[in-house]
Image (cartoon, rainbow, N blue to C red):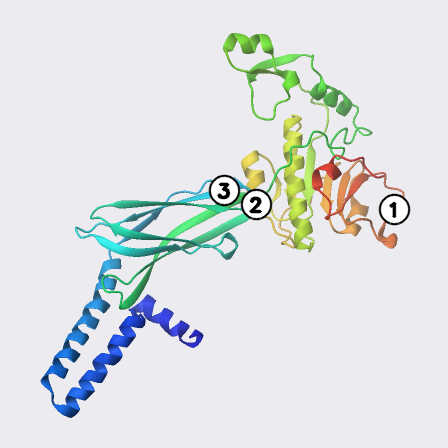
Amino acid sequence: MKIFNPVTNWLETHGVAPAYGGGLLSFLAVFFFGAATNTMAGWLYVISGISLALLAIAAILPMRSLRPIQVRRSAIQPVSVGDVLTVELEIYNPTPQPKTLIQVQDQLPTTLGKATTVIETLHPQEVYPWVYDIPTAKRGVYHWQRVQLRTGTPLGLFWCRRERITHGTAVIYPQVFPLSSCPLVDNMGQEYSPHIEDRHRFQLATEGVTRTLRPYRYGDPTRLIHWRSSARYGELRVRELERSTGGQEIIICLDSAFPWQPDDFEQAVTVAASLYFYCCRCQLNVQLWTAQTGSVHGHHVVLSTLAAVQPAESSQAEVPPFLPLVWLTQNPLSLTTLPPGSRWAFWGISLPQEQTTPPKLSDAGIYIDSTQPLPPQLQSSLRL
């Protein structure tokens, strides 16, 4: 049967392909016609003629049924790994005749799985909404553009399949861990800038110079809620303290030019996202750097960049500035060239003896064990 699959697919997409019943009826029609030719029996000619007429009708009607149908796709909202991706399509029948028994299949990328539905009756001028959910397990940016329509109506003797072009893009962001602390970021570069300690004290303070009051946002520390104003306004109000401006910005660098192990790289992307949003919650000036995009900032831009980044990608961006940074890598040699005061996360239980960081560097970091949960490792003490 597999030998005939390419032929059957070609016939379905360019014309019609016989179903089992259609093939059997075609064989009987030819058989009766041959028998009528040999015996000159009129009733055999009648049976053969009726069979051929049914076959002709059954072959023409599926193509006519699918030809006018239109498909429209709504924009797909980005989600994070573990959330449900919702896809919405509209199948429209612009004709005055109803369409029946239509199979609709969205040609999704292999990673996202399959999505198929059957429309029993599509009434004249009706728009049929098809909404389905896809569980997400891997981050990425996925593109596809084909929706397949298939029918055998009305007799089921022939199958016809046609495609509609409707572009779809799904963005699946990496997972973000809600860290309560992170030694990789806390007091980073303190030995090079005394203002960092003041800035960290501002972040942890419950009292200080209040710059403004604003509505509560998810993730804000409860210690900064101004209860008197919250009672007056009827909603939670948060104190925004005056920020110190003397410290340097934090740059989280993902060494995406290195050919990582796939599973380790996925963990590194998750760590980069978690560190970025931890810095944002601490009201730090933070940027993300990758080998292809360079430095970016902003929640949507950073998440989109991390959704699309791949290991061993081409280095098209400028090198990060020679300032203390957070370096995420699987390349031990890159740890020897970090700017003073930097922090690093290395994927591996330990570094090879001949490739350990030279003693002259005082940079601290953590070794990530890919077999262990990430949040406890990110909140553990640094190794010097």
The quadrant of the picture occupied by the N terminus is: bottom left
The type of residue carrying mark 2 is Ala
Residue position for label 2: 307
Per the image, label 2 sits on a secondary structure element best described as helix
- Mark 2 vs mark 3, CA separation in Å: 16 Å
Can you see residue 241? no
Tag 2 near tag 1, CB within 8 Å: no
- Foreground tag (2 vs 1): 2
Image height check: is 59 above or below 229?
below
Q: Nearer the viewer, mark 2 or mark 3?
A: 3
* Residue at the disc numbered 1: 358
Residue at x-position 64% and y-position 12%: 210
The residue shown at (73%, 45%) is 372
Is 374 left, or right, of 216 in this rendering?
right
* Residue 257 at x, y percent in the picture: 67, 52
Residue density around tag 3, few if under 14, some if 14–19, many if 20 or more, within 10 Å: some
Q: Earlier in the sequence, mark 3 or mark 1?
A: 3
Image mark for residue 84:
3
Give the mark nearest the N terminus, 2 or 3.
3
- In the structure shown, which secondary structural element does the residue marked by tag 1 occupy? loop
Q: Amino acid at mark 1?
A: Pro
Marks 3 and 1, Cα distance to the nearest angstrom?
A: 46 Å
Specify the amino acid type for callout 3.
Answer: Val
